[in-house]
Amino acid sequence: MSTTAETSFPGPREAEPGVLVHSRRDREAGAETWLILAARDKAEARRDWAEYGVALLRCGLHFTAVRIPAEIVHAVAGTSDREGVASYLATALDGGPCFFDGSSRSFYALLPLSAAQRWDVPGTEVLGGDFFLGVPATTITAPDPRCAAWWVVPMDGPAALCDVGIVRWLVERGLLLAEVRAEASEDA
């Protein structure tokens, strides 16, 4: 016993009073604006993103970054397949932002500033202080001919950063798995 009301599309939901609903594009624009605040010259950084797909942003002002070698991420993800890694990281990082740079064969997780003082995980490097990092435009989420970097897990909005504990766990687990695989291949 089906009625039209039960089988028809209910249409858009009304937001609860006082609740703001932002589209993906609004959140992306907010993340872009927030990231650009870390540029020495904001207009130049916007031009660089448009022309080259990447701009130099200063770590240590609004965020810090952790450079994680691809081997560690591939070990913990159980794959080196680009889509498989992206799917794994989106879940494992709980949506925290991370990009890949093919030039350095490294992943960069963006973390709160406080991570710079207490990050001590072997095999990685924390980029704080006045380190300038080539960050891809927020719209680049796949390999792009303009640059070697792209967002594996795009920022979900301004100041939406990775959880330090999650990134630490991911890296430590990846190091352990890479070590176990190396030992297994030596024994074979």
Image (cartoon, rainbow, N blue to C red):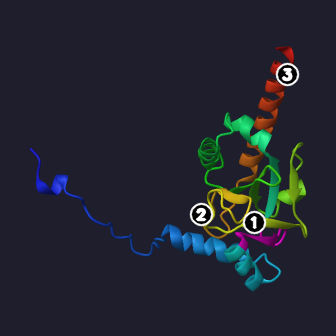
Give yes or no for residue 25 being in the magenta stretch.
no
What is the spatial separation of the Cα atoms under label 3 and label 2, in whole angstroms? 39 Å
Amino acid type of the residue that numbered disc 1 sits on in the rendered structure: Val
Quadrant showing the N terminus: top left
Residue designated by label 3: 183
Amino acid type of the residue that numbered disc 2 sits on in the rendered structure: Asp
> Residues in magenta?
52-63
Estimate the x, y position of residue 150 in percent, counting from the top left: 68, 59
Binning the other alpha carbons within 10 Å of mark 2 as few (below 14), some (14 to 19) or many (20 upward) gives many
Estimate the x, y position of residue 124 in percent, counting from the top left: 86, 47
Binning the other alpha carbons within 10 Å of mark 1 as few (below 14), some (14 to 19) or many (20 upward) gives many
Residue lying furthest front in this view? 145
Chain-order first, disc 3 or disc 1: 1
Binning the other alpha carbons within 10 Å of mark 3 as few (below 14), some (14 to 19) or many (20 upward) gives few
Chain-order first, disc 1 or disc 2: 1
Residue designated by label 1: 135
Residue lying furthest left in this view? 1
Amino acid type of the residue that numbered disc 3 sits on in the rendered structure: Glu
Chain-order first, disc 3 or disc 2: 2
Secondary structure of the residue carrying numbered label 2: loop
Query: At 59% across and 75% down in the image, what residue appears?
Result: 29
Secondary structure of the residue carrying numbered label 3: helix
Residue designated by label 2: 156
Apparent side of residue 21 relative to residue 1 in the rendered image (left or right): right
Q: Nearer the viewer, mark 1 or mark 2?
A: 1
